[in-house]
Image (cartoon, grey):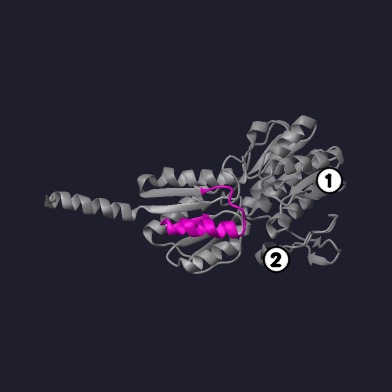
Amino acid sequence: MKITTVLTGAALALGLAGAALAQDKVKAGFIYVGPIGDGGWTHEHDIGRQAVEAEFGDKVETVYQESVPEGADAERALTQMALQGADIIFTTSFGYMDPTINVAARFPNVKFEHATGYKSADNVGTYSARFYEGRAVQGLIAGRMTKSNKIGYIASFPIPEVIRGINSAYIHAKKVNPDVQFSVVWAYTWFDPAKESDAAKALIEQGADVILQHTDSTAPQAAAKAKGGVITFGQASDMSEYAPSPRVSSIIDNWGPYYIRQVGAVMDGTWKSENTWDGIGAGMVKIGEMSDAIPADVQAEAKALMASLADGSYHAFTGPLNKQDGSAWLAEGETADDGTLAGMNFYVEGLTGDVPN
């Protein structure tokens, strides 16, 4: 027995409309280097993803994959996400750069956005934040508040973004405290609480009473709290659960507005490959609330620095500055150009130790 279904004109129209709506929904994918519960870098990117959902509602579908290692695993994850119909994919770690470029070449109709990298294509844009501006503020506070004059810095990988941060923090700590010394420990990880905790403990044992970090977990905060008398700063996220001390302030990565803008551009057909690098002034870098552990005069000084960075009246890398080997880099009043900053692979004068290869 054959059963035939006959659609009325109205039903057919509704069905076609539903299909059109399904096709019009934009699918945005996110590839994360850590877990969304890391409390830092990936946590803030996922808050940005949620902001996209809140902004566009049923006009968008978001998907994500967390804890994707940099390298071949990233290429597989990207390929799968593209095959599953993603219209735009955000790849949120420096080590995803080549996998992003490789997969984008195979999927020319998919838009890709790579965070903190420098390679682009017709369907690949890049974006990053001027984290070094936030490091300048942290450096000032650290230089004012250290009692031992020893500041520890937990670094992730020796890429320009991290080296810029170390230099900026040191420059501004040294400006307010000529006696300050920096010790840098390279953890070679973005997220490994055990390694991060060990690095913090080692720096504290060496006499550091301020710990800065360019790693993603709250483990250094916990180590500082357990020791007592050590101050820290939230990294990428506010980490306010450790306020008012040891966490006295933070750098907060504010990705939501950018993600909303770029997904919206895919929706209205205006997306194009661009290189975005914004800082405090544009709101991509925020400074977390300063706790009462920071003296009022230091808070005022830090807020004045924030304001000058935001309005462009001051640049975090302003001469006179020399490179570590004593060779001249920036003359009096000269500021670093973006090209040099984007490829920074050297320490400034006064920092000890070598930048790893």
Q: Which residue is mark 2?
A: 340
Mark 1: few, some, or many residues within 10 Å (few <14, many ≥20)?
some
User: Looking at the rendered structure, which numbered label has been put on residue 177?
Assistant: 1
Do the residues bearing badges 1 and 2 touch, measured as CB atoms within 8 Å?
no
Left or right of 39, for residue 246? right
Residue 313 versus residue 272: which sits nearer the camera?
Answer: 272
Foreground disc of the pair 1, 2: 2
> Quarter of the image holding residue 86?
bottom left
Asked whether residue 108 is in view, the answer is: yes
Provide residue 287's location: percent of width, then percent of height. 64, 43
Q: Which residue appears at 59% of the width and 62% of the height?
A: 97
Q: Amino acid at mark 1?
A: Asn
Q: Is residue 235 above or below residue 72?
A: above
Q: Which secondary structure lies at badge 2? A: helix
Question: At 79% across and 35% down in the image, what residue appears?
Answer: 230
Answer with left or right where residue 274 lies relative to residue 181.
Answer: left
Q: In the drawing, what numbered circle is on residue 264?
A: none
The Cα atoms of the two marked residues, 1 and 2, are separated by 26 Å
Q: Three-letter amino acid code at disc 2? A: Thr
Q: Nearer the viewer, residue 147 or 227?
A: 227
Image location of residue 110, percent across then percent down: 44, 62
Provide residue 56's location: percent of width, then percent of height: 39, 47
N-term mark: 1 or 2: 1
| Residue 147 to residue 85: above or below | above
Q: The magenta stretch spans which residues?
A: 65-90
Whether residue 299 is visible, yes or no, is no
Check residue 113 for magenta coloring.
no
